Amino acid sequence: MTVSAPAPTAASPLVSVVLLTYNRRQFLERSLAAAIAQDYPHLEVVVVDNASADDTAAYVATHFPMVRLVRNPRNLFFTGGMNAGIRAARGELLLLLTDDVVLERDYVAKLVPLLQQVPDLALLAGVLYDADTGTVRCAGGRVQFGVDVIRIVHDIPVPAAPQRETLCPVPYVPPTLTLARRAALDAVGAFDDDFKFTGEDIDLVLKLQRRGYRIALYPAAAAYHLPPVTMQYRENETIDFHMEKNVFLLYFKFAPLATLLGFLGYRYAWLAKQLGLMLLGRRRPLGRATWRAHIWWIGHLPRLAAKRWQMQRWQYRVAGG
């Protein structure tokens, strides 16, 4: 006799795991197996393949026929890939996950009741540990705008064992192991596709806070980060371009005006100095990625101004009640 699982209810809603992967099948096997093994009763798993060249899509279709597979025709990077998965998912709660993160079996079951209890809680994550060493990689954090750099400061200690069952408000959690409320993501347009990758995590948490949502950590839930096999992927002009360009995006969208003007002044003083050193033969020419990033923000200034104005309007509305 076949017994169907009970239908999702308000207390136990459907959760969609949106698992993004690209050319890391050796990681995906562990991450996907752990997602499927979650002991939460109402779960769907959506794997988004960003046009991997290692037969990831075929592997998933053959070995995990129970999951929903989204095959992107090309690499849409993190933002485009995640947004495609969010659109395909059916749950009102979404577990945003990447292929290098392995969840403990009770991860989703621990987080869902807590998110349900706090209506304005948009993102909730557990502690991320290193899979090899067991050391803490991320237990929440805060975003800090400096003169010329934006940092995620990880200075929030993991509570001692007796306090780990407590919900801890934090300014930042990474969207790679995070339970998210779909309504909150819809309210801010999910991931801003101008970022592609790097900085999109900061953008998401700051947008949600501008809309009046909260973010929290639950230390009793745990996930594990698989260490990268190589860092060679960073030696790439496209990646360097997006990393530099996204600094401009974040400053324009969120930095106080004085901080933004100070950042631009510092940047162009640095640029002038580098050009002088180049003319004197005392340094190599700047890379194409740096020039592309500076040209990009100038060419997109009207759009950046519109994004900044939208962030300010959200902030004023929340402040005004």
Image: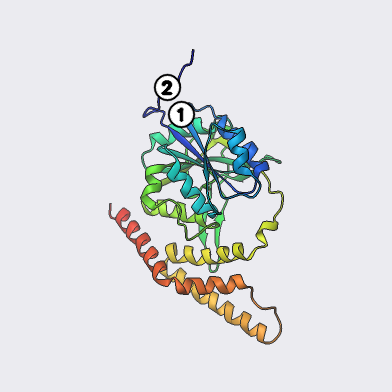
Q: Which mark is residue 6?
A: 2
Q: Residue furthest bottom?
A: 280
* Position in image of residue 299 (x %, y %): 46, 73
Q: Seen in the image, is 281 located left or right of residue 174?
A: right
* Position in image of residue 101 (x %, y %): 60, 42
For residue 150, which quarter of the picture? bottom right
Q: Which mark is residue 84?
A: none
Label 1 sits on what residue type?
Answer: His
Q: Seen in the image, is 296 located left or right of residue 290?
A: left
Q: Residue at x 58, y 77 (%)?
A: 270
Q: Seen in the image, is 6 located left or right of residue 321?
A: right
Cα gap from disc 1 to disc 2, whole angstroms: 8 Å
Query: Which mark sits nearer the N-terminus, 1 or 2?
Result: 2
**Secondary structure of the residue carrying numbered label 1:** loop
Nearer the observer, 278 or 318: 278
Q: Which mark is residue 42?
A: 1
Q: Residue furthest top?
A: 1
* Position in image of residue 251 (x %, y %): 47, 65
The number of numbered badges drawn on the structure is 2
Q: Are marks 1 and 2 in contact (CB under 8 Å)?
A: yes
* Position in image of residue 312 (x %, y %): 35, 61
For residue 38, which quarter of the picture? top right
**Secondary structure of the residue carrying numbered label 2:** loop
Q: Is residue 104 above or below residue 256?
A: above
Q: Residue at x 40, y 34 (%)?
A: 116
Label 2 sits on what residue type?
Answer: Pro
